[in-house]
Amino acid sequence: MIVGALLTPCNVYSGLKIGWTFNMSVAAGLIGFVFWSAAGRLRGTPGWGIKENNLNQTAASAAASIISAGLAAPIPALAILTGQTLPFGLLAIWLLVISLLGIVVAAGLRNQLLLRDRLPFPSGMVTAETMSEIHRGGKDAAALLQTLGSLAALSASVKGAVTYWGIGPIAPAFKTVLSTRGGETLAVSAKNLGFALDPSFLMVGFGAISGLRISASLLLGSLLAWGVLAPIALSKGWAHPGAADANAVWFGPLVEWLLWPGATLMVTASLTSFAISMVRVYGRSHAAGADEEAAQAWVMPPRIFAIAFGFVLVACVWAQTSIFGIGLIEAVLAVGLSYVLAIVAARVSGETAITPIGALGKITQLTFGAISPGAVSTNLMTANVTGGAAGQCADLMHDLRTGQIIGATPSFQLLAQTFGVLAGAFVASFTYLLLIPDPVNQLITPEWPAPAVATWKAVAEVLSQGVSAIPTGAGEAIAVAAVAGIGLAFAEAHSEDPIRKWLPSASVIGLGFVIPAWNALSMFSGALLAALLAHWAPDFAKKRIMVIAAGLIVGESLAGVIGAMLSIAG
């Protein structure tokens, strides 16, 4: 809890500065190992085992992930639009309650996603690999740890240099001219659409872990969205360009249109896959008593799960109605929708290590824009429930994956996660109120750009008009995306292994619609390099690919954490 309390301010700071936060599991594991190893040498304390460290990183990462409960987006957006700033006590309670909902959802999904569907959850794999190398010892372990350290240092150095010199994604000097509906011409560069090389190793590492199928699906989605649909939307006037500069990135204005088909793909594909999986499990369990491992490995017994879900349901409804004046029916509906969308978030995160909190939050905003048009507080804070639950659920699923690999006890991790969000709720509330006492005048400024706050604020303003706020042309795109998502999910579920591995993942294609194209390019390059290495040197690849990827991810993540700490200290 103390380690988590030390790391939480970094995510609060970076979330408000750049709209991006860091997974703190590896950082927490390294801090715990260094501290207790030093204590063992100096004070003779008992050895610090890997399972103890797993509980440490589970609690600490839960604390740092508290930012997903709204501090970097809907809560500041609400303050700007309505002037409502929560006092310390209510803010901490709100963050805690929303995060507990995500923990309960993850407890219910653990068997399905880890034991039956066997999703990789790349961040959890990286954490397990990193901690295993640290705790293993021996000559081989020392060599692997040296590889890990060297690549981490390289990745961190690149991150530091890029940050210091302000180097952005580098794009080729490619331009095209579009004819718009008004008869005018519009010059569009590759950089405008996000087709550039990002000087970063983080996504390269994730691509090496996720594999060629997932990374190729992400690249396919990115090419469809930013290479095909974005130019069409610009030419027809459905979306508006950004600054008239070949080096400007038009991500903000274009993603407001692209997120609709992208989120539809993610939602329909994820829910279809989940439904098919559950039907099969139900049929097998009644026909042949299959899935014994999953049935015997409940994180919490079904009766306890029902009680826990009932508790968080009441707590979330109370928090929404009493703090923000949200109607009872809307509050209950928000919790139910959050459960469904947390499933989507967990599946997408399980395949790619990216949790699409923002895109899924827009689904809730759209829903309540239709149910309660004009109610800004309802629109933002019901979506806050969705985003917070999804973020904390995905974080715990990655930690449970780490625990699964090293043989930890899931129920202990669940307790650690609960104590972690308790620490995070209080520390994050204090940090936010200390840094941002006046959101209206401080945020969306050069000092505090808060890009996520700006996005949520804009969507809330638009969706207060109701369903009619869906951008022109997006309705047809949503319909096509829904059919494609359901169709690809069915095809994947009913295909044999040789064919299935070549089918693109619809949920990952959808993710390509809502992230910059350079992220997809980086992930694909990492997956391609890993695949070539596995082909040319299979023995070396089997031992080293995961360590290499972990080093790239750990280095940049720690560099980001240290940079945030130095910024706070400065």
Image (cartoon, rainbow, N blue to C red):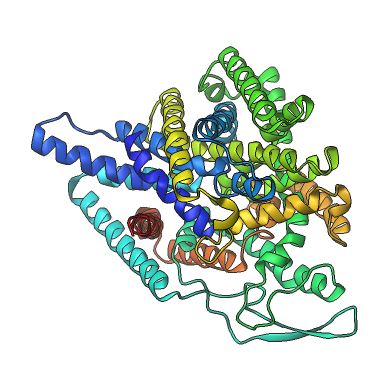
Q: In the displayed structure, does residue 41 sit left or right of residue 130? A: left
Q: Position of residue 63 (x, y in %)?
A: 43, 38
Whether residue 274 sits left or right of residue 40 in the image: it is right
Instruction: Say which residue appears at 46% left-offset and 76% top-offset.
Output: 167
- Name the residue at 53% across, 29% down: 93
- Which residue is at a point 54% across and 37% down the rendered structure image? 392
Q: Position of residue 248 (x, y in %)?
A: 62, 77
Q: Is residue 419 visible?
A: yes
- Residue drawn at x 45%, y 41% is 428
Q: Horizontally, is 428 left or right of 195 in the view?
A: left
The relative height of residue 387 versus residue 532 in the rendered view (above or below) is above
> Which quadrant holds the N terminus?
top left
Image quadrant in which you'd find residue 105? top right
- Total marks drawn? 0
Q: Is 367 rendered above or below residue 488?
A: above
Q: Nearer the viewer, residue 206 or 497?
A: 206
Q: Position of residue 513 (x, y in %)?
A: 69, 60
Say if residue 22 shows up in the picture.
no
Extreme residue in the top direction: 303
Q: Quadrant of the C terminus?
A: bottom left
Residue 290 against residue 485 in the figure, above or below: above
Observer-nearest residue: 87 or 365?
Answer: 87
